Amino acid sequence: MPNLITRLGLDALLRTDHIGRYTLQCSLATVVVLTLLVALDAVTQTVLIAALGASTFIAFAVPRSLVSSPRCMIGGYLAGIISGALMSTLNMAFEFSDIVLAHVSLIVFAALATGLAMFLMVVTRTEHPPAAALALGLVLNHWTPLTLLVVIGGVIALSICKRLVLPILLDLL
């Protein structure tokens, strides 16, 4: 395989020096996501649960980075939930009969949720980028309190799984 990669000129593009490690950690991440999706029955809230996919990448690709720490992952998701739920609730409080105004309101509150999530994460030192996506998703999509429990339960479970296998994980980036 290395000869084929070299002959095709892909050796500069592909990192094959630790292919076994990449395979192991990506496989572990796949198993964790599969388990979370089955356990959380996340199929009905795919847009909101999608942030967990990005968090899984961070947790298993750069497990020793600050953004993959339990503090940042769980704290960031709490900031995202607070800001997204708040801005979603405020948006629903405004009832516009004009569809254009309703759409503009949705866009404004979605942007506010993202900015507020970022602000809360920065001031609490719980920066976790996928949590800003969650805040945005909470405004743009229908959710219930159960959705919020599923999301926070998922990120807690992801943090626990990462912590259990951390001794065998390397930073891949």
Image (tube, rainbow, N blue to C red):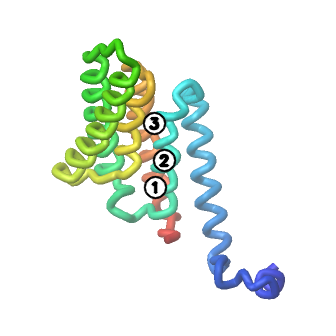
Q: Residue at x 67, y 72 (%)?
A: 19
Neighbours of disc 2 within 10 Å: few (<14), some (14-19), many (20+)? some
Q: Is residue 164 above or below residue 144?
A: below
Q: Is residue 81 visible?
A: no
**Residue designated by label 2:** 161
Q: Residue at x 35, y 57 (%)?
A: 67
The answer to which of marks 1 and 3 sits earlier in the sequence is 1
**Residue designated by label 3:** 154
- On the image, the x and y values in percent for residue 86 come to 25, 27
- On the image, the x and y values in percent for residue 54 come to 49, 50
Mark 2 residue element: helix
Callout 3 amino acid: Gly
Mark 1 residue element: helix
Q: Residue at x 47, y 52 (%)?
A: 162
**Residue designated by label 1:** 59
Q: Label 2, label 1: how many angstroms apart (C-alpha)?
A: 9 Å
Neighbours of disc 3 within 10 Å: few (<14), some (14-19), many (20+)? many
Q: Is residue 145 above or below residue 126?
A: above
Q: Residue at x 38, y 34 (%)?
A: 152
Mark 3 residue element: helix
The answer to which of marks 2 and 3 sits earlier in the sequence is 3
Viewer-proximal residue, 102 or 165?
102
* Quarter where residue 23 is shown: bottom right
Viewer-proximal residue, 29 or 101?
101
Q: Along the horizontal axis of the image, is 173 left or right of 100?
A: right
Viewer-proximal residue, 91 or 137?
91
Do labels 2 and 1 touch, CB within 8 Å?
yes
Q: Label 2, label 3: how many angstroms apart (C-alpha)?
A: 10 Å
Callout 1 amino acid: Ala
Q: Is residue 157 visible?
A: yes
Callout 2 amino acid: Cys
